[in-house]
Image (cartoon, helix red, strand yellow):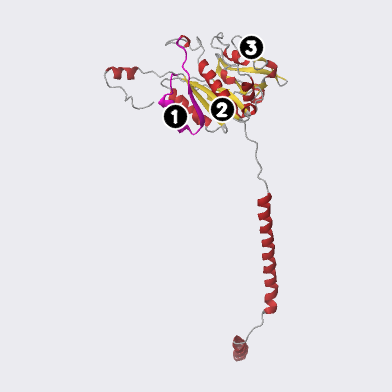
Amino acid sequence: MAARMKLKLKTVFVLYFMVSLMGLVYALMQLGQRCDCTEHDMPKDRTISRLRGELHRFQEQIRKSDVTKQPQKLPAKPTIFVITPTYARLVQKAELTRLSQTFLHVPQLHWIVVEDSPHKTPLVSDLLVKSGLAYTHLHMPTAKDRKLQEGDPSWLKPRGVEQRNEGLRWLREDRRAQPGGDNQQGVVYFADDDNTYSLQIFEEMRSTQRVSVWPVGLVGGMKYERPVVEEGKVVRFHTGWRPSRPFPMDMAGFAVSLKLVLANPEACFDGDAPMGFLESSFLQGLVTMDELEPKADNCSKVLVWHTRTEKPKMKREEALQAQGLGSDRAVEV
């Protein structure tokens, strides 16, 4: 049995070897012969040529489309002109820095800074140059008899009257000097340098047609003051002090369309207005309560706060100055 098995394996091996050898000989005979592959290559070449033609046509269509297509112009956003009165004090640079860095996040904003000073100061000039904002730097000193004295309560005399009016004067003159300036879309807002502003409030006011209004937080000894809205109209004001005023609102609680400001060149703030009537002195000739445009979800959201920075206590500084060891005056704070 074992001998028979060996014979079979030997026979299979010999057959396998002969078939392999014949295959090798046939392959060697084919090596030197020329192969006519035209019939195989022609369909491939035709496909490549067709694809190249289609690509060329697409490129031509794109080129012609780019030449004839007119670029779509997005409507420009109305510019927000922010008028900020400011005066020299220890926290002035800190306040203006904080405010300017808020404004950097607001597109299409022009900052009009008006110093309560007989001249422009280097501190404010340098800050504005480095701010990265579109700005105008003005100055207008407050008359001595209108200035608050040391120790006076902040409500005794209105602050920033001359500066806001100077900002309005410049704005009217500058816009009228521009071609079509009287019809330019824009919004005017009065932003004190110590308030806190949500970025959302600027987008809310940007669509102002005449006078838009919204709540102000932490003002008038209350959590907030606001216009009360019913069926989309302002009907009264939520305020704790003299609600019978024509417009019992804080300065931070309204914005005015640029067209309305330009169309009413006499509209300004009255420095002789009774306490609490400063805003009303400006708005009375511009709008009625029925025409007010409620923003901030029908005046239900607080997006601006009447914050105030605490006056720094300088007792140790004063003591060191008395010893000739005070802080270096060349270091700007």
Task: Indicate whether 204 appears above or below 18.
Answer: above
Q: Which mark is residue 198?
A: 2
**Res. 179 in view:** yes
Measure the C-alpha gap from mark 3 to mark 2: 27 Å
Q: Residue at x 62, y 25 (%)?
A: 258
- Count of marks placed on residues: 3
* Quarter that holds the N terminus: bottom right
Image position, residue 109 (x, y; %)? 56, 30
Circles 1, 2 touching at the beta carbon (< 8 Å): no
Amino acid under disc 1: Leu
Front-lying residue, 213 or 111: 111
Q: Which mark is residue 199?
A: none
Amino acid bearing label 3: Pro
- Horizontally, residue 127 falls left or right of residue 20, namely left
Q: Earlier in the sequence, mark 1 or mark 3?
A: 1
Q: Quadrant of the C terminus?
A: top left
Residue at the image position 66 percent from the left and 58 percent from the top: 59
Vertical placement of residue 282 versus 40, above or below: above
Q: Amino acid at mark 2?
A: Ser
Mark 2 Cα-neighbour bin, 10 Å: few <14, some 14–19, many ≥20: few
How far is the residue under mark 1 from the one under mark 2? 22 Å
Q: Are marks 1 and 3 in contact (CB under 8 Å)?
A: no
- What is the secondary structure assignment of the residue under circle 2? loop
> In the rendered structure, which segment of residues is drawn in magenta?
117-144
Residue 239 appears at what percent x and percent y?
61, 13
Please give the name of the residue rendered at 52% of the width and 15% of the height, measured from the top-left corner: 161
Check disc 3: other Cα within 10 Å, few if <14, some if 14-19, many if 20+: some
Residue matched to label 3: 246
Residue that sits furthest to the left in the current view: 323
Residue under label 1, please give it.
127
For mark 1, give the secondary structure: helix
